[in-house]
Amino acid sequence: MARNENLYLAILKGDRSSVQTIMQEAIDQNLDVNDLLDNSMIPAMREMGERFSRNEVYVPEMLIAARAMQAGLALIEPILVKSNHQPRETVAVGTVKGDLHDIGKNLVAIMLKGAGYEVVDLGTNCSVEKYDEAVAAGAKIVMCSALLTTTMTYMEEVVKHFQSNNSIKVIIGGAPVTKKYADSIGAYAYGRDANEAVKIVDRIVSQ
Ligand code: B1M
């Protein structure tokens, strides 16, 4: 479907209240919120990154855009999460140590909840110890997100940490991460986006 130009521009401008108004109208009109997410909201964040790379915007603008995006996500979360399933498996989700980006990680958590999983959201800046706590609490699947080339390398530490425990599967993802990188560090799997991440978890659970 076509991009919703008003929503796209409102996120770029970091205009939180316009984002909320547009999203609420979309919800009231029963529009496809997945379509808004994929074709308007995520592309706006991508464009923000391009502008940052070209030094056209700086960290404060990125932060304001992120807040507008999170406000929109909060409104559609109940729709994305709507699920009839009983919780079927506990999954830990966190952004790795040194990394504060959480929108992609939040999306992964929302989609997992929508698929009926019990999600332990560890937040950002997760050390191995933090993932360990979730495993001790029953998580068998550990999902690591990273948005920086400098922090994705920490995923190798997480993978190594759980290597001796065959029952724990580490799945990784995030903008700079690739399947090649996942294979090179011995991660169980790489998820390109939040939907793919859920499919991987579904596959593990159905095995
Ligand atoms: Co940052 N930032 N940022 N930033 N930021 C990027 C990532 C960057 C690419 C911008 C750029 O230069 N073009 C760049 C990284 C460059 C690099 O490493 N190669 C960058 C930089 C440099 C920085 C700082 C270092 C800037 C500075 O301080 N000088 C700094 C680092 C802070 C830190 O973390 N220690 C920084 C800070 C910030 C803000 C705090 C201002 C803000 C984050 C706010 C927040 O998250 N609450 C921010 C933002 C907003 C961005 C961009 C613009 C948008 C990120 C985003 O939310 N995208 C980003 C540009 C970009 O990504 N193109 C950028 C939307 C989101 C839905 O996508 O998270 O990729 P994403 O998630 C996708 C997939 O990747 C996947 O699923 C999602 C789609 O369904 N996915 C998974 C994600 N995790 C997954 C896990 C999985 C599976 C799939 O399984 C486990």
Image (cartoon, rainbow, N blue to C red):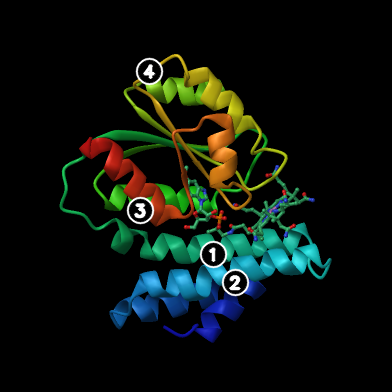
In the displayed structure, 2 sits above or below 65; it is below
Q: Helix or strand or loop: what does disc 2 sit on?
A: helix
Q: Which residue is mark 4?
A: 136
Q: Which mark is residue 44?
A: 2
Task: Say whether disc 2 or disc 1 marks the residue closer to the N-terminus.
Answer: 2
Residue 44 at x, y percent in the picture: 59, 71
Q: CA distance from mark 4 to mark 1?
A: 33 Å
Image marks 3 and 2: residues in contact by CB distance under 8 Å? no
Asked whether, in this view, residue 178 is left or right of residue 47, the answer is left
Q: Amino acid at mark 2?
A: Ala
Type of amino acid under label 3: Met
Q: Is mark 1 within 8 Å of ligand 1?
A: yes
Q: Residue at x 40, y 74 (%)?
A: 35
Spatial CA span between label 1 and label 3: 16 Å
Identify residue for label 1: 69
- CB under 8 Å between discs 2 and 1: yes
Q: CA distance from mark 2 to mark 4?
A: 38 Å
